[in-house]
Amino acid sequence: MMPSEDIKTGAESACLLKVTGLHRSYSMARSSLWRKPEPLQALRGVSFTLKAGQSLGVVGESGSGKSTLARLVMALDTPTAGTVQLKGRDLHRMSSHELRSARRDFQMVFQDPYASLDPRMTVERIVAEPLCTLEQPPAREAQRSQVQTVLSQVGLRAQDADKYPHEFSGGQRQRIAIARALITRPQLIVADEPVSALDVSVQAQVLNLMQQLQRELGLSYLFISHDLAVVQHVCDEVIVLYQGQIVERGTPQKLFSAPEHPYTQALVKAAPRLPAQYR
Ligand code: ADP
Ligand code: MG
């Protein structure tokens, strides 16, 4: 395993996200009357840093703790131990008021574009929703124009704002979800398996879009996937999670060409579309 310094970022001021010693355990149901329930350790001492403008991939099989990590970084869940700092401030020690204003800086894209968009809301309302959680939401007219801007950034049309989610394909829905994440002009987007529910051909389009947005807007992604081949399109560095722990980290090229941990070796073997430059 490579030392954590490999992902560290030189100037501390450029550090966007710093995760230190993150633990999350869940109490399990009691299996019998005389046996004490053992907590399930979903994350066990995860640490990494992410520089502004850089992207970090998180790969691991189902149950390895990826979504738990995403929820903790999004302050949707509380760690059992450890800290998550965004631009030097501990997210889990903020007041609800402070968290509200900090939320502008980090947004999330979920896996399932069918479940994550409310079918009763128009695209305009869905995309504008994060604005309503801000301290000072924009006026109606300004909101409409911001929605138009992000829709065009994700390759949708202005008139799509008045439609409902069922009028769109899976790939288009994920574009709507990305537009919603962009509307507050965040620096960090946490994407939890953003293309896993999509057909392979559509996956490539959405990945290209995410890559393009990253370049144009200087975004950082915490990009979660069970598929190493997917994260290498978007990420400068990758961490490999196994049973709640980081077992390896490095550039995608390094993990593909010289995986050290047996679990990473298995992931590389399982990667379905090994890109030509890494063969
Ligand atoms: P992944 O996203 O990599 O598939 P998760 O973070 O969802 O993994 O889950 C990691 C482990 O934590 C799994 O064993 C899962 O069953 C457990 N887990 C996740 N959320 C909860 C919860 N709310 N209560 C109990 N166990 C949970
Ligand atoms: Mg998950």
Image (cartoon, grey):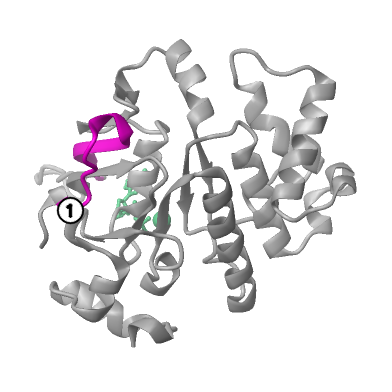
For the record, the magenta segment spans 6-28
For the question of whether residue 40 can be seen, the reply is: no
Front-most of residues 39 and 44: 44
Q: Looking at the image, is 210 positioned above or below residue 37?
A: below
Question: Relative to the observer, which residue lies in front, 30 or 254?
Answer: 254
Q: Nearer the viewer, residue 64 or 104?
A: 104
Residue 48 vs 86, above or below: the answer is below
User: In the rendered image of this protein, does residue 265 appear above or below residue 187?
Assistant: below
Looking at the image, residue 176 sits to the left or right of residue 13; the answer is: right
> Where on the picture, by quarter, is residue 99?
top left
Q: Quadrant of the C terminus?
A: bottom left
The reply to whether the magenta stretch includes residue 13 is yes
x and y percentages locating residue 28 in the rendered image: 24, 45
- Position of 77 with respect to 4 (left or right) is right
Q: Tally the numbered discs.
A: 1
Which amino acid lies under the numbered mark 1 shown in the image of this protein? Asp
Relative placement, left or right, of 222 versus 129 is left
For the N terminus, the quadrant is: bottom left
Instruction: Determine if the C-beta at disc 1 is less than 8 A from ligand 1.
Output: no
Q: Where is residue 137 in the image (x, y as percent from the top left)?
A: 68, 17
Query: Disc 1 designates what residue?
Result: 6
Residue 224's image quarter? bottom left
Question: Can you say whether 143 is above or below 162 in the image?
Answer: above
Residue 269 magenta-highlighted: no
Disc 1 packing (10 Å; few <14; some 14–19; many ≥20): few
